[in-house]
Image (tube, rainbow, N blue to C red):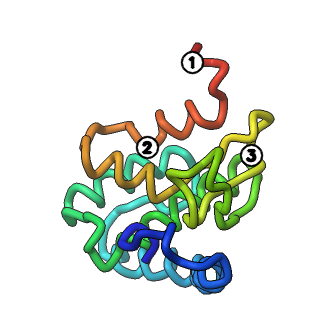
Amino acid sequence: EFIRADLRKVSKKELLETFDKFLLAVDFRIEHLKYATKDNSYNWDFSLKSFDSLENFILKKNIDENHELFDDVASYIGEVVRRNYGGKWECCLDMRGNSMLYGMPVISGFNKYGVLLSPYEELGLFIFRKKKGMIANNIEMIINPQSFY
C-alpha cells in the first residue's frame, strides 16, 4: 500500500484517509499473518524474541514488497515496538525533518529522542540484507540510540 506509491504526490487528506484505513486494519493484518502460519511453529507473542520467527518466516516465504503478506509483516513489526516500548501509530506528515518517511505509517513517542520508526523501512532493509537478527538490532538502535554511540 504505502511503499508502492510516490506519497509526495498524494494530498494530505488522501494520506490521512489511507492511514485511517491502515490503522483500522492493523489487528486484522496480524491475525491474517497468524492464520497464514498456523500450521508452523512461529512465535507471534509480540516479544522482541519473536523477530527471530518473523525473520525465518520472511526468508522461508520469500516475502518482498509485492507479497500479499508484506503489509501484515510490517504491521506486526510496528505492533511489537508499540506494545513493548509505548508510542502510537501516526502518519508522518513532516516533509522537512522526515522526508523519507513522508506519508508512511510510523510509530512515534516511544523514546525521548523523538525518533520515528517505520516498520516498512525496517522490513525493507531486512528483505534487502537478509541478515539474521537485523530487525531486533535495528529496532534496539532506534529505541535507544545513545547505547550505540
Q: Quadrant of the C terminus?
A: top right
Does residue 87 appear to the left or right of 141 in the view shown?
A: right
- Identify the amino acid type marked 3: Phe
- Identify the amino acid type marked 1: Phe
Q: Nearer the viewer, residue 129 or 13?
A: 13
Measured from the top left, where is residue 25 in percent x and y? 58, 83
Q: Earlier in the sequence, mark 3 or mark 2?
A: 3
Instruction: Mark 2 and mark 1 in contact? Answer it, CB < 8 Å.
Output: no
Which circle marks residue 135 in the picture?
Answer: 2
Q: Earlier in the sequence, mark 3 or mark 1?
A: 3
SS for dot 2: helix
Measured from the top left, where is residue 62 in percent x and y? 19, 62
Label 1 Cα crowd, 10 Å radius (few <14 / some 14-19 / many 20+): few
Residue with the mark numbered 3: 110
SS for dot 1: helix
Which circle marks residue 148 in the picture?
Answer: 1
Label 2 Cα crowd, 10 Å radius (few <14 / some 14-19 / many 20+): many
SS for dot 3: loop
Measured from the top left, where is residue 44 in percent x and y? 49, 62
- Identify the amino acid type marked 2: Ile
CA–CA distance in space, label 2 to label 1:
15 Å
Label 3 Cα crowd, 10 Å radius (few <14 / some 14-19 / many 20+): many
- The residue located at (22%, 55%) in the rendering is 59
- The residue located at (57%, 66%) in the rendering is 103
